[in-house]
Amino acid sequence: MSRGSVVIAAALAQRPGAGGHTWFALQYLLGFRALGWEVTLVDRLDPGMPEDGLAYLAEAMERFGLGDEWSVLLPEGESAGLRRAEVECRLASSDFLLNVMGYLDDEELLALPPLRVFLDVDPGFGQMWHELGLADPFAGHDRFVTVGLDVGGAGCGVPDCGLEWIATLPPVVLARWPAVAGGSAFTSVATWRGPYGPVEFGGRTYGLRVHEFRRFLELPERVPAEFQLALAIDPGDAADIERLQGAGWTLRDPAAVAADPVSYRSFIQASAAEFTVAKAMYVDTRSGWFSDRSACYLASGKPVVAQETGFAGHLPTGEGLLAFSTADEAAAAVEAVRGDRERHARSARAIAEEHLDAGRVLSRLVEQLGAVRANA
């Protein structure tokens, strides 16, 4: 007997070629399924969106045994995968809808599930847009979950918008991310700017990764380590590209090395460790954001050197996961990993097993939501 039924709404068909983004949704889909839940992914394609998105999504779902568990809503009431009528049935009979950034905004469909859960994966942006009157992504939802581990806390600059926030760590399906021996490079997969612009709020400007990364450009000149970035960066940022390469960063095209879930996983598992810089929004608000990508590195036995956003108050740091705030701290953390990589690799996997395992993370989330059915 199924433990329950969850519908997850997320934008995957809109982003073909983004293997890491696809894995974000897969961790929830596969994680819930491993716990015995029935799962459904609901996506949409509006006019002007990528034409190859449907084929990309269908292939990814089929590869991971989810070929019958997805629907992409199309204009004029059409759909691909599951028909709209089946989506309606699944929403109505579900225990809850997990709606990533309020992505599913069809009022008829939103009215069907008994519990509508907003999942905030970009803490600070949606909340500030709401307070500035620019958007209300939270409308129509009953509960509010965020990967900003400190949102709602006294030391966090993200407005709570009068809502009660449930914090969650990013889940990783450990069976799909085994610890493996890797290469020699510190790597990451990232966007230089991303889909959102900076936000002016409360007399401050909250920026993007580009605004933080420039502080650490000289790291390869300070530490004799190899650094590779699978970086989505626009040719218009030619000056930044030149500075990165001139400082010793090797830039890889994410469309070549991380364009689907399999190549994304292979890129991470071929790494020695991750070096990652966060968006300025996450750093300056002390949101406690921790990356789902870094969770994959840790599960793969890859130490993570990550810019501190407040996550160090929720995850063990010092071995396997090392936090930094300054360029000196970043250099020292990289040197520490290079000095005893095997010890840090063991600790990395242990952190994933203890804190990020999808079975633990999702079971805890369901309990916090009060979404367990009587027959579970």
Image (spheres, helix red, strand yellow):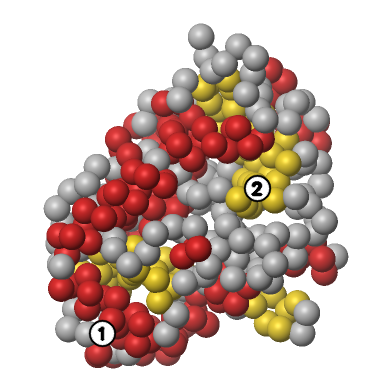
Residue matched to label 2: 166
Distance Cα–Cα, label 1 vs label 2: 38 Å
In the rendered image, the vertical position of residue 38 relative to residue 76, given as above or below: above
Give the amino acid at mark 2. Answer: Ile
Q: Front-most of 178 and 308? A: 308
- What residue sits 67% from the left and 30% below the top? 370
Q: Earlier in the sequence, mark 1 or mark 2?
A: 2
In the rendered image, the vertical position of residue 248 relative to residue 253, given as above or below: below
In the rendered image, the vertical position of residue 260 relative to residue 149, given as above or below: above
- What residue sits 24% from the left and 90% below the top? 221
Left-right relation of 217 to 28: left
- What residue sits 65% from the left and 47% below the top? 166
Mark 1 surroundings: few (<14), some (14-19) or many (≥20) residues within 10 A: some
Left-right relation of 217 to 227: right
- What residue sits 28% from the left and 90% below the top? 246
SS assignment at label 1: helix
Residue 321 in view here: yes
Q: Position of residue 31 (x, y in %)?
A: 44, 33
Residue matched to label 1: 220
Left-right relation of 344 to 212: left
